[in-house]
Image (spheres, rainbow, N blue to C red):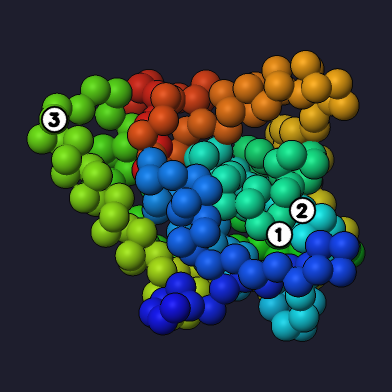
């Protein structure tokens, strides 16, 4: 494989080395949210070397926290780290950066490994205001839908440059205690699955509902866009 996605993600699981490339994530998640899937891929490509000095991370020791609820990013992190299934994936409204504007305020990812963590921010210009406005449109005409599908593919390509630093910037590795949430901020929503198979299915369905809202075509999630209309996925 050649091109921007040729440098894959490498993690270990019970001593076995595993490699993931962007097409693997796309096959797992499906075509609905390619832009946010590319964000997750680039977030992992940038953060993993920072957290373990270029060595393979133990996939089940990785934690993800983000203000972004989109299914593409969620599915990308899940495939590589199993963080959603094992309760290490958190939707954290407190991570939002309102000073970055409506378009970018939720695109914040905190990747933790053992006692270290780094925060990643999507760079300005990577996501267009028009794209986000169309994503928040409750009803789209057939022509708008075709245009939106084209825009999703364009944003995916934009987010997959040879270097992940072109689309994200990192605040660098810091001890976890330096990333603690200030008092009074909203608590993260931690996803934990029960052990019973029946209740696990119910919990997985709930995860699907609460994680929707972002870069794709899935039904809108519970939160509302500033316009009062539910955001659709990119």
Mark 2: few/some/many CA within 10 Å (<14, 14-19, 20+): many
The residue singled out by tag 2 in the image is 63
User: Extreme left residue here?
Assistant: 143
Residue 102 percent coordinates (x, y): 41, 44
Point 87% across, 26% down: residue: 195
Q: Closer to the camera, 96 or 157?
A: 157
Q: Which mark is residue 156?
A: none
Mark 3: few/some/many CA within 10 Å (<14, 14-19, 20+): few
Residue 23 percent coordinates (x, y): 46, 61
Residue 190 in view in this figure: no
Residue 215, placed above or below residue 48: above
Residue 174 occupies quadrant:
bottom right
Residue 5 percent coordinates (x, y): 46, 73
Q: Which mark is residue 111?
A: 1
Residue 52, placed above or below residue 202: below
Dots 2, 1 in contact, CB < 8 A: yes
Residue 234 occupies quadrant:
top left
Point 38% across, 41% down: residue: 32
Dots 2, 3 in contact, CB < 8 A: no
**Earlier residue among tags 2 and 1:** 2
Residue 233 in view in this figure: yes
Dots 3, 1 in contact, CB < 8 A: no
- Between the C-alphas of marks 2 and 3, the distance is 39 Å
Secondary structure category for the residue under label 2:
strand
Secondary structure category for the residue under label 1:
strand
The residue singled out by tag 3 in the image is 142
């Amino acid at each position: 494989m050649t091109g921007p996605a040729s440098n894959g993600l490498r993690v270990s699981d019970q001593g076995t080395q595993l490699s993931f490339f962007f097409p693997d994530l796309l096959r797992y998640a499906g075509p609905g949210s390619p832009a946010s899937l590319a964000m997750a891929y680039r977030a992992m490509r940038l953060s993993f070397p920072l957290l373990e000095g270029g060595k393979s991370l133990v996939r089940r020791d990785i934690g993800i926290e983000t203000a972004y609820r989109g299914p593409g990013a969620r599915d990308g992190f899940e495939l590589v780290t199993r963080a959603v299934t094992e309760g290490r994936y958190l939707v954290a409204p407190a991570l939002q950066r309102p000073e970055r504007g409506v378009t970018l305020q939720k695109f914040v990812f905190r990747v933790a490994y053992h006692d270290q963590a780094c925060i990643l921010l999507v760079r300005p210009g990577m996501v267009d205001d028009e794209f986000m406005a169309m994503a928040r449109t409750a009803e789209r005409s057939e022509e708008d839908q075709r245009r939106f599908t084209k825009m999703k593919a364009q944003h995916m390509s934009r987010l997959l440059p040879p270097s992940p630093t072109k689309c994200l910037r990192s605040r660098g590795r810091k001890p976890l205690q330096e990333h603690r949430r200030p008092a009074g901020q909203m608590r993260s929503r931690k996803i934990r699955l029960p052990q019973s198979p029946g209740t696990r299915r119910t919990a997985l369905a709930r995860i699907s509902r609460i994680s929707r809202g972002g870069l794709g075509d899935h039904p809108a999630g519970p939160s509302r866009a500033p316009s009062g209309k539910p955001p659709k996925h990119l």
